[in-house]
Image (cartoon, grey):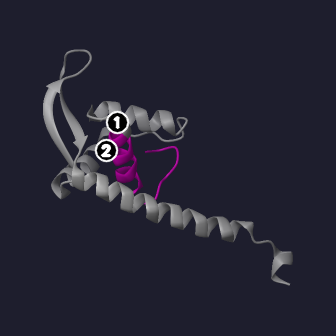
Amino acid sequence: MKETDVRQGTLALMVLKTLDVLGPLHGYGIARRIEQISGDLLTVNQGTLYPVLLKLELEGSVASEWGASENNRKARFYRLTRQGRKQLQAEARSWEQTASIMDRFFAVKAQDLK
């Protein structure tokens, strides 16, 4: 990623959500979808994405298998596992709570403290 830095673990959450919505997808497709959803504010490169995919696979959150891509090239396709779906739900709740707390802080104005 180059355009905007994101909190550690955020890319993993984006990968999980992408696979939850779109189903099995190869790494290039995951990267492009994340870029698309971000409005091209994020650029996801292989050096950033593949370590995250490997970590998720080692944790059991995603599983992978080889297949043919749209242009008939050999590609590794990743899919969300049951454990990955549980992880996604837990992390989504945590993010919602964090975002809610931050919204409260950004809503406070100096006059509110008097």
Q: Is residue 36 visible?
A: yes
Q: Is residue 83 left or right of residue 13?
A: left
Q: Nearer the viewer, mark 1 or mark 2?
A: 1
Q: Is residue 40 left or right of residue 60?
A: right
Quadrant of the image for the C terminus?
bottom right
> Against 47, is 69 above or below?
above
Which residue is located at x 46 percent, y 36 percent? 35
* Image location (x, y in percent) of residue 27: 28, 35
Which image quadrant is residue 83 in? bottom left
- Specify the label residue 94 is tagged with: none
Which residue is located at x 52 percent, y 48 percent? 4
* Image location (x, y in percent) of residue 32: 40, 32
Q: Amino acid at mark 2?
A: Leu
* CA neighbours of label 1 inside 10 A, class few (<14), some (14 to 19), many (20+): many
* Residue topped by disc 2: 49
* Residue topped by disc 1: 30
Q: Are marks 1 and 2 in contact (CB under 8 Å)?
A: yes
As drawn, the residue found furthest toward the top would be 71
As drawn, the residue found furthest toward the bottom would be 114
Q: Is residue 17 magenta?
A: yes
The part of the chain drawn in magenta is 1-20
* Image location (x, y in percent) of residue 28: 31, 31
As drawn, the residue found furthest toward the left would be 66
